[in-house]
Amino acid sequence: MRISKSPWLLHYDGSSCNGCDIEVLAATTPRFDVERFGIINTGNPRHADIFLCTGGINSQNKDVVRQIYDQMPDPKVVLACGICACDGGIFKDCYNISGGTDTVIPVDVYVPGCAVRPEALIDGVVKALKILDDKADRMKRGEYKSLTSEEYAAKLSGEKKDDREEKGDA
Ligand code: SF4
């Protein structure tokens, strides 16, 4: 796999139990050493290429997740790490949880697990790097632009409407 630049990674903890966050730490520190792929941690969305989310989406963090995503420059990739980020996990039926990361922004790679294993996380990051490179190539050819969170919300509500029409509920 060709990696044309050091990808910068931003980790955001949505409403996790912190189990996955500890594994993210393990993956990004010398024991599992995700830095061997040239990955650097950043706290600044404007410098980030990879958005790594743990925990589900709730009414408090949904706008924060959208904002971070929108502030990241193109091309960018989103990883949902842990089953809570994939689909809400054990918190799915809580009164204020809307589900996983893809309820507010598009997700490129899903890494399930409870907690997510560092090896699975590193595997997910490697997949994300390939997707990032593909997006960069398509952008250069003028064939790709990522959706904004607003465009994504409109796409989701269109899909829901289509589903209702198919079922005859609309
Ligand atoms: S997937 Fe498991 S370990 Fe990770 S945040 Fe959810 S409950 Fe915690």
Image: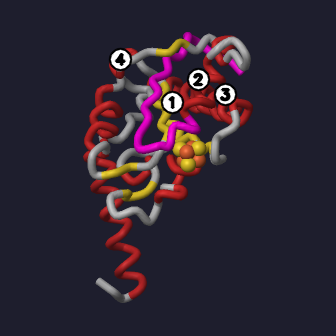
Residue 126's label in the rendered image is 3
Q: Are marks 3 and 2 in contact (CB under 8 Å)?
A: no
Identity, as a three-letter code, of the amino acid under mark 2: Leu
Residue 25's label in the rendered image is 2
Cα gap from disc 3 to disc 1, whole angstroms: 14 Å
Q: Name the residue located 31 percent from the left edge and 43 percent from the top edge.
A: 61
Q: Which residue is mark 4?
A: 44
Q: Nearer the viewer, mark 4 or mark 2?
A: 2
Residue 134 placement (x, y as % from top left): 57, 29
| Horizontal side, residue 126 vs residue 91: left or right | right
Q: Which residues are magenta?
A: 1-20
Q: Secondary structure at mark 1?
A: helix
Residue 135's label in the rendered image is 1
In the image, is residue 4 part of the stretch drawn in magenta? yes
Q: Residues within 10 Å of mark 2 (few under 14, many from 20)?
A: some
Q: Name the residue located 65 percent from the left edge and 40 percent from the top edge.
A: 116
Q: Determine whether 24 is above or below 103 in the image.
A: above
Q: Are marks 2 and 1 in contact (CB under 8 Å)?
A: no
Q: Residues within 10 Å of mark 1 (few under 14, many from 20)?
A: many
Q: Secondary structure at mark 3?
A: helix
Sequence-wise, the earlier of marks 2 and 1 is 2
Kindly indicate the quadrant of the structure image that contains residue 163: bottom left
Q: Nearer the viewer, mark 3 or mark 2?
A: 2
